[in-house]
Image (cartoon, rainbow, N blue to C red):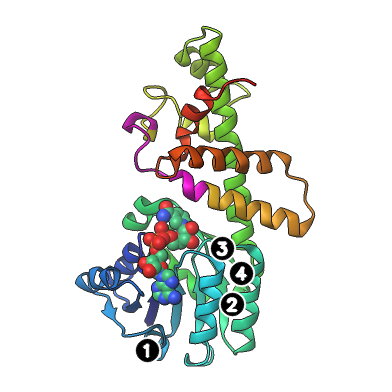
Amino acid sequence: MKIAFIGLGNMGGPMATNLVAKGFVVKGFDIVAANLDKAAERGVVAARSAVSAVKDADIVITMVPAGQHVLDLYRTILLPARRGTLFIDCSTIDVASAREAHAMAQGAGMQSLDAPVSGGTAGAAGATLTFMAGGDAEAFERAHPVLSAMGKRIVHCGGAGAGQAAKICNNMILGVSMIAVSEAFVLAEKLGLEATALYDVASAASGQCWSLTSYCPVPGVGPASPADNDYRSGFAAALMLKDLALAQQAAAAAGAATPLGAHAEQLYRSFIAAGGAEKDFSAIIRYLAETPRD
Ligand code: NAD
């Protein structure tokens, strides 16, 4: 099976390499020559353009920054691809653009799937990503062996755009819950309550959640997390803001009231304006600790 892989950045590079390692023939393209060269060193066949990458492909995977990139690419690569090719977009993009990409692909006689991921760069490197897929059952079945070569959990969430919807809803929970956990630790400190005492109580009580027990924002509390490494690596605050903004965009379009999601977006925007973009998103606890109560 021949795969075209477009967008060989922090995520796409290692994902394409994993496909090569599992025996797929992968033709790759990236507009940044250094990213293309790096993938080529690991067995990806370097194409001169996106068009040349897709020409004889059975499956086309895109992993680019945003919806506009996906739509621009689809305008260029749908025509030269063979009819019936399966187009899988793994980028995290807005639901409306994802649905438009599906419509464009179907209109050109292709199969299509939106399949954003969670698991970050470590998941991409270790082939342990979770894929959240949207599209019809036939496209999902066809994509499954390829997605399995890059991830460990592949979930069919529903029709066109359902994968993107699942991704932003999950990450809205994550952003809001990380802020809630962080606020609780900031308040506890001001009340003279030890962080470990709050952890011991809340981790086994009704305040329990992933942000607390698997990814505690306080250094030295709970299992190892980016907080123990000065909030380096992990999931960058800038990417959390991107996902919260996509959730708000979708909520506005769908007429859903998401007041806490909206507030979480504002707080991450302020944190990033204060220099937090590259830090892990759990570093919002430091920002909250320094924010005066008005
Ligand atoms: P990145 O910026 O490292 O990689 C994107 C790549 O796409 C770049 O190499 C860029 O040159 C290339 N590109 C852009 N337009 C192109 C075009 N027209 N043709 C060919 N190549 C093109 O970003 P990333 O971290 O790899 O993220 C990719 C997607 O995955 C984003 O949508 C992001 O939100 C999502 N995501 C990232 C993470 C993460 O931890 N980095 C986790 C989950 C999801």
Query: Where residue 147 sits: x, y (%)?
Result: 44, 67
Q: Which residue is mark 4?
A: 98
Q: Nearer the viewer, mark 2 or mark 1?
A: 1
Q: Nearer the viewer, mark 4 or mark 2?
A: 4
Q: Are marks 3 and 4 in contact (CB under 8 Å)?
A: yes
Left or right for 108, reference 5: right
Query: Any atom of ligand 1 within 8 Å of the CB at mark 4?
Result: no
Q: Is residue 110 above or below residue 231?
A: below
Q: Are marks 1 and 4 in contact (CB under 8 Å)?
A: no
Q: Which residue is mark 1?
A: 52
- Amino acid type for the residue under numbered disc 1: Ser
Left or right for 221, reference 140: left
Which stretch did the figure color magenta? Answer: 227-240
Q: Are marks 2 and 1 in contact (CB under 8 Å)?
A: no
Give the distance between the C-alpha atoms of the residues marked 3 and 1, in whole angstroms. 25 Å
Q: Which residue is mark 3?
A: 93
Left or right for 155, reference 216: right
- Amino acid type for the residue under numbered disc 3: Ile
- Quarter the N terminus occupies: bottom left
Query: Any atom of ligand 1 within 8 Å of the CB at mark 2?
Result: no
SS of the residue at dot 3?
Answer: loop
Viewer-proximal residue, 182 or 55?
A: 182
Residue beneath the point at 49% across and 19% down? 199
Q: Which residue is mark 2?
A: 138
- Amino acid type for the residue under numbered disc 4: Ala
Give the distance between the C-alpha atoms of the residues marked 4 and 2, in whole angstroms. 18 Å
Res 17 → quadrant: bottom left
Query: Mark 2 or mark 3, which has the lower sequence index?
Result: 3
Q: Is residue 228 magenta?
A: yes
- Quarter the C terminus occupies: top right
Query: Any atom of ligand 1 within 8 Å of the CB at mark 3?
Result: yes
Query: Where residue 71 sits: x, y (%)?
Result: 56, 76
